[in-house]
Amino acid sequence: MEFKSAEEGRIEKFPVGMRVLAVDDNPTCLRKLEELLLRCKYHVTKTMESKKALEMLRENSNMFDLVISDVEMPDADGFKLLETGLEMDLPVIMLSAHSDYDSVMKGILHGACDYLVKPVALKELQNIWHHVVKKNIKSYAKNIGTSRQLLPPSQSDLVPGVSKKRKDKVNDSGDDDDSDREEDDGEGSEQDGDESGTRKKPRVVWSQELHQKFVNAVQQLGLDKAVPKKILDLMNIEGLTRENVASHLQKYRLYLKKIDEGQQQNMTPDAFGTRDSSYFQMAQLDGLRDFTATRQLPSSGLLSRSHLTKIQPHLYSSINLQGMNSSGFIQQGHHQSSSNSANPFGTYHSTLPPRIQNVNLFQRTSSPLESLQFPRSKCSAYMGDFKSIGDRPIGGGFVDSCMSYGSSSTSLPSASTNTLMLQGNYTQPLHTVSSVNQPCIEKTLSNAASPNISVQGLSRLPSQSWQGNLNTTRFLSNSSPLNHAFFPDQVTCAGNNLGDCSSLVSAGNPGGGMQCEPQLLGGFLQNINSLDGQKWEQQNCSMVNNTFGNVEYPLPGDNMVFRENNAARSKGVDESLMSPIENSGNVNSQEYVGKPSTMVSAEMMKSGKPENAHIDNQNQHDVFDDIMNEMMKQEENNGMVSVAARFGFDSFPPP
Amino acid sequence: MDLVQMQKSLQDYTKSLFLEGILDSQFLQLQQLQDESNPDFVSQVVTLFFQDSDRILNDLSLSLDQQVVDFKKVDPHVHQLKGSSSSIGAQRVKNACVVFRNFCEQQNVEACHRCLQQVKQEYYLVKNRLETLFKLEQQIVASGGMVPAVELGF
């Protein structure tokens, strides 16, 4: 490559003669820098004044090939120079005496090509020419219209976890096609920024609205006759492919199935039987709203499920949060809408591993279980039932989480206090969650008034199902929305296990009338408890890891565990999640996701196996996927029981 | 003293500065940048350093003597001094600046005064040593000799 020096008119072999503009207000440093650059055979123009540098740049855009500037100059802002350089498509290297993470991050975020820490070594300067080359290649590529993609390495490195998780997910569960497909499917309403780097196609994010449309279409066609093509036509969403719908449908079917199964097994089968859209709507408490935003979770599987939860705005969200690692929950959270209640779940669900959610929920609420007290006494009773469930990542978790979340989120529709609460609380977190690594959840959780959350959600649901009997049937009928709401969550979270739980949870959540059907919950709980906690843990862990990977759960007081792939984070989440659970008392924290931080384990542990460990290791992205897978598996194997066990709901009273 | 001896003295002296931690590898780098085409580079840069530092230390004294110390002014000065001392390898000065900055952040006037004293002390020390070093070099050059390349063996 050759660079022609405009001024000198000589042709030198690049990088010899590369024209560098060096800016530093420290004369000693500047002189040394100049010498170093000269040693590298660059052509150097130096100035101590940023203003002068800007002038020179503007005067002739072609005067320099590269700018290297100190950032901390008292009379000038190094970033201003950076911006100008960027405008002119010049590579700008930042120099600073500060090597702390934040400063470096700031520089990089501002678009610096590189960030060098003073004192700079000769070797470092000898390599700076490649920045010029990079820029030139890009413009070259653009100019000649080459299709060659020059992806910055960072992009592909961005979410190594994601792709890995996907793989893990696939390996982990038999249910991989859903998740994988979900992730790889076409454009979605939202894109998981983290994953886009690794994925070729943007993932479809099943927002509440989208999911609601989907559900509407399915209902219109009749579940038996609902085929992807027709659903797609009815939905009439631009950019949505048949494949997207197909995989979503599959997940939805599984979810429904789980709910049904769960109900039959544990609690009141019918409770969950009906999936009323109303339930979903209820679920769509605010909490869910935020899910959309947070859809960051890589675990597509979970996410996809979460959209199922969308139906139940709040419930789902709460559920998701609670424990359903399934993204489903999260999605619910993001239910479309729920306008008001913050959709904690909504935001979360994509990001929060269901498992974590549960935990959080529990933790958040001072007594997650309480919040779950579904209507026995007005939802509180129910809540109680849920409590047990709640502990579990699935049902219990959700409830609790919902509860905790609910309280925090004010947005939860008042409808049923409980359900709303759940959602509400979650929504808050969800909101925060939406942003990757947001510690929102934590906050929200902590704020959540807790118990009510779940109750709220539940209260939303027509109490019918709750009334009195926890039979699934009852729930189904009444709390269908809830059921649904939870369903996705549950399903997603625990993967298979959740399925069972979900029904329970949903039953509980719908609390619609907040009439918690303790029995239902109880049964569920028992089942859950009996389930092998391990799985749950795993799921939870993974979920936690994954789900929260990107989101910062405002777990009660804890740092958001859900940072992406942040083991520590997940830990945090776990903890936070755990706390509510503790409150509830029955928290089966054990499984809490992955890095079961002390909290989680302590709380979750109800059931007993605090395993936290493995989950942490999993890719966070896969949390939901894993959870879902787990749930699926468990569902198949054990039905509710397995789910319960998985989630560590050992404490569930036998149905 | 003959040339060889002077050169030896210079080498030993330089080494001692490194061993005492007064100078660090950055100074070596400066020396490596010096060559026939650039024979006075090191002394150039070091002179710049002295000028800059004198000014800064003066400003610092003034700022800290104010009734109400404006740390927003103090900190950038210390930062600048830290940067320049580090770029030429005046290690002890740099370290003293780091401590100084911490106290600035804490807005501890008393401690800052002590830090300033410490910085000054280190600065005068390195200034003195470097001036001696340059004198030795000048003597060698005046005697017709070449300043030996710095040994990196220690």
Image (spheres, coloured by chain):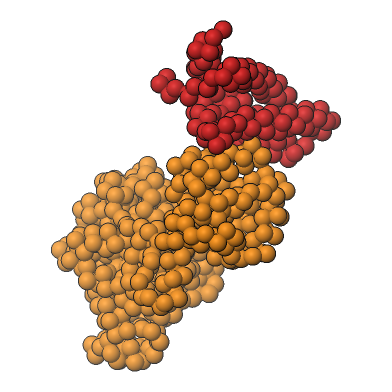
Chain colours: A orange, B red
User: Residue B94 falls in which quadrant of the image?
Assistant: top right
Q: Is residue A400 shown to the viewer in this render? A: no
* Residue at 40% from the left image edge and 87% from the top image edge: A237
The spot of residue A229 in percent (x, y) is 28, 90
Q: Is residue A2 shown to the viewer in this render? A: yes
- A414 left or right of B116 in image: left
- A108 left or right of A323 in image: right
**Whether residue A114 is situated above or below residue B114 in the rendered picture:** below
The spot of residue A397 in percent (x, y) is 36, 58
Nearest to the observer: residue A286 or residue B3: B3
From the image, which quarter does the C terminus of chain A lie in? bottom left
The spot of residue A266 in percent (x, y) is 24, 65
Nearest to the observer: residue A586 or residue B98: B98
Residue furthest out toward the right: B67
User: Residue A35 falls in which quadrant of the image?
Assistant: top right
Number of numbered markers: 0
User: Residue A301 falls in which quadrant of the image?
Assistant: bottom left
**Whether residue A47 is situated above or below residue A286 in the rendered picture:** above
The spot of residue A6 in percent (x, y) is 57, 62
* Residue at 77% from the left image edge and 29% from the top image edge: B58
Nearest to the observer: residue A544 or residue A643: A544
* Residue at 53% from the left image edge and 13% from the top image edge: B3
From the image, which quarter does the N terminus of chain A lie in? bottom left
